[in-house]
Amino acid sequence: MKSSHGTFAAIVWIVAGTLVYNSEPEARLFSWQTPVYFVLGMFAAGALFGNLSYATVRGMTHALVVTKIVTAPTRRAQIGLTVTGYILFALEAVLIYLVARWTVRMMF
């Protein structure tokens, strides 16, 4: 499960970078910053945001069990946790996009 969080973060970094490079007039595709941004950034985003996402999901699941909001592995609990996971992934994608945009603006 931990590797899927890192993979998701790396893919979102590449997609967000492509969108940012296309929309920012200062960003140049043929420069030394481009491979640094995409290659190093992909690994850094996978490690940083992947671990952060994994820790958040694990912490939220643990908190729900400790507070006895989720007491048994029922179908309703599974649906609720799945929806919560999708919301967290969406928030992570927005955060990665904002960091990617900030990074491109700082590089150029």
Image (cartoon, helix red, strand yellow):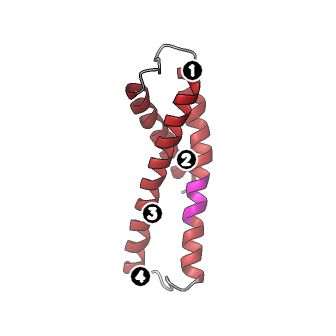
Look at the numbered discs 3 and 1 and tell me whether their residues touch, using CB distance below 8 Å: no
Mark linked to residue 74 = 4
Q: Nearer the viewer, mark 4 or mark 2?
A: 2
| SS at circle 2 | helix
Residue in the picture at 57% in, 41% down:
45
Residue in the picture at 61% in, 38% down:
44
Magenta highlight on residue 54: yes
Name the residue that disc number 1 marks: 33
Give residue 36's position: percent from left, percent from top: 59, 24
Give residue 102's position: percent from left, percent from top: 53, 36
Q: Nearer the viewer, mark 2 or mark 1?
A: 1
The quadrant where residue 25 appears? top left
18 lies left or right of 100: left
Q: Amino acid at mark 3?
A: Gly
Q: Spatial distance from mark 4 to mark 2, Cα to Cα?
A: 28 Å
Q: Nearer the viewer, mark 3 or mark 1?
A: 1
Region rendered in magenta: 52-57
92 lies left or right of 41: left
Q: Earlier in the sequence, mark 4 or mark 1?
A: 1
Q: Dot 2 surroundings within 10 Å: few (below 14), some, or many (20 or more)?
A: many
Mark linked to residue 80 = none
Q: Amino acid at mark 2?
A: Gly
Give residue 21's position: percent from left, percent from top: 43, 26
Q: Main secondary structure of the magenta part?
A: helix
Look at the numbered discs 4 and 2 and tell me whether their residues touch, using CB distance below 8 Å: no
Q: Where the N terminus falls, by quadrant?
A: bottom right
Q: Earlier in the sequence, mark 3 or mark 1?
A: 1
Magenta highlight on residue 80: no
| SS at circle 4 | loop
Q: Spatial distance from mark 2 to mark 3, Cα to Cα?
A: 15 Å
